[in-house]
Amino acid sequence: MTPGPFQAIPAIMTGLLLAGCASTAPTSQQDSPPGLYHDSHPIAYERAPETPFPKDTLYALLVAEFAGHRDRLDLSLGNYLEQANNTRDPGVAERALRIAHYIGARQAALEAARLWAETSPDDLQALQTYALELANAGELNEAARLMQRILEQGGDTHFDLLAARAEDLPATQQHSMLALIEETTKSFPDNTQLMLARALLLEHEQKFDSALEQLQQLLRKEPENRKGLLHLNRLLHRIGRNQEAADNLEIALEQHPKDQRLRLLYGRVLLELEQPERALKEFKILHERSPNDSDLTLSIALTALEGNQLNEAEVYLNLLLLQGEKEASAHYYLGRLAENRDEWQQARDHYLQVTAGDEFLPAYTQLSKLLADRERWPEAQQYLRQARDQRPELRIQLFMLESEVLIEQRQYDQADTALDKALELYPRNTSLLYARAMLAEKNDDLEKLEQDLRTIISIDADNAIALNALGYTLADRTDRYQEAAELIRRAMALNPNDPAVIDSMGWVEFRLGNLQQSLQYLQQAYGMMPDHEIAAHLVEVLWVMDQRQQARQVWQEALQKNPDSELLKAVMERLNPS
């Protein structure tokens, strides 16, 4: 059991009873990271303050210690934080910080660290701790400025940590931090932490060549710098230079065979190089060293699956179940394994045991398809109803899933019934309305399609998908071309670079007889997305414009990519029946 901050309470109480907390910083283990508890060496107050604590303060601190001893850490933290503010004593502030860390009170830890740093401006440990708390709170630029001050005073910093966390900052803040790092580098040109931080920030700005150059400079200075090695090869992996990364990592692991992060990256790079057997070997080495690491165990199982080593994958998935870890993932992939072996009942049982996590919807998707393919749809519907009761927050997605599987089975009437039921519960849900509109198109019920799409537009006037779908349908299935063009123009104003909208614009221009404009739009859309439906439209326009050789060329290219496209086959049969 991890010792708590009150394990050695008598010694602390004695210090308080003698005189109160000293104004100097408490002693701590030198090899422990700043800001963590040092429970084997409880805080020892080296000397009494020049002015002893008032009785009220002393009483509040004694209450705090007794509360901590009785596991009332919330009360203890409150008292210590209040008295840290009242007394401005660094020892009290540090004590408050340690308690805040222990119970995970992040905001209180930040306040206590601030007080400790303010009351001990020359204490590098206090400044380092405050900088890290600022980083934890997302105040990265302020933390960077404080680290600059620490560096100037000769202390250790964590610029690389700040740079790594800056990835989610707005671009302006990232650039501001990069400018600060580069300014600091002028005074400390050989500081490898600054080099690494600069490389990471350059990567965030997608200046990959500059980031690589900085990392290579770092490694020329410190060839054994493992953070540098890791980030260099991670960046090579990110930009697709996987073989180069693999070669580097192989050499690095000969020099640092126990480095888990380098080996994990090596395994991932080998997967990208489509070498699952070699990747699996690396993951197994990691697993031998960390047998209780459930993330690693799952990675091994998935790597074995990818390499078609099904029996081995099954061993590791079952190991997760024995350990009681990542059970949802384990059951999901064991279900996929059983399905692969045509053991559908075992697959069903595994899928039903996925009750939470990211695999919940995929499990029920597989379960529904599995049962539908075996003409056991009533059973699938029963499980979906149970799932909707168990996970009410996912009801809409589960209704959508039910309708999608029914549509795949060409059970359009049942799918329509499922969507009608869902919309009784959620009448203004645009996803359900859109799904029912697209189903109505399959059923040639254009009135229902238009009604549902117009309902979406009334709810969300800027819904480009609904505007485009309605505009295209009116252009394709009716003679209401002007109305269709207006709807598509609205969609294009919202999504000017969407090839589906550009295709619709090309098609409505064709319907309006504007062949040259139609051709321009369709060629643009097809260049962006060589979809078989866009190809069919382009073929028809080229044919009507008497560019038949080009039309046949587009048709043949599209059919080669989409050999099962009924749309492509139908358009050429209609245009060139001979």
Image (cartoon, rainbow, N blue to C red):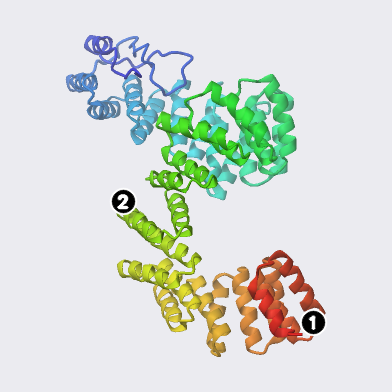
Q: Is residue 468 above or below residue 130?
A: below
Question: How many residues crowd around disc 1 within 10 Å: few (fewer than 14), some, or many (20 or more)?
Answer: some
Residue type, label 1: Arg
Q: Which residue is mark 1?
A: 548
Mark closer to the chain start, 1 or 2: 2
Residue in front for this viewpoint, 115 or 279? 279
**Residue 412, quarter of the rendered image:** bottom left
The kind of secondary structure element at disc 2 is: helix
Quarter of the image where the C terminus is located: bottom right
The kind of secondary structure element at disc 1 is: helix
Location of residue 380 in the rendering, given as x and y in whole percent from the top left corner: 39, 57
Location of residue 57 in the rendering, given as x and y in whole percent from the top left corner: 21, 22
Q: Is residue 560 left or right of residue 110?
A: right
Q: Which residue is mark 2?
A: 390
Quarter of the image where the N terminus is located: top left
Residue at image location 24% in from the left, 27% down from the top: 79
- CA separation, marks 1 and 2? 58 Å
Residue at image location 44% in from the left, 13% down from the top: 29
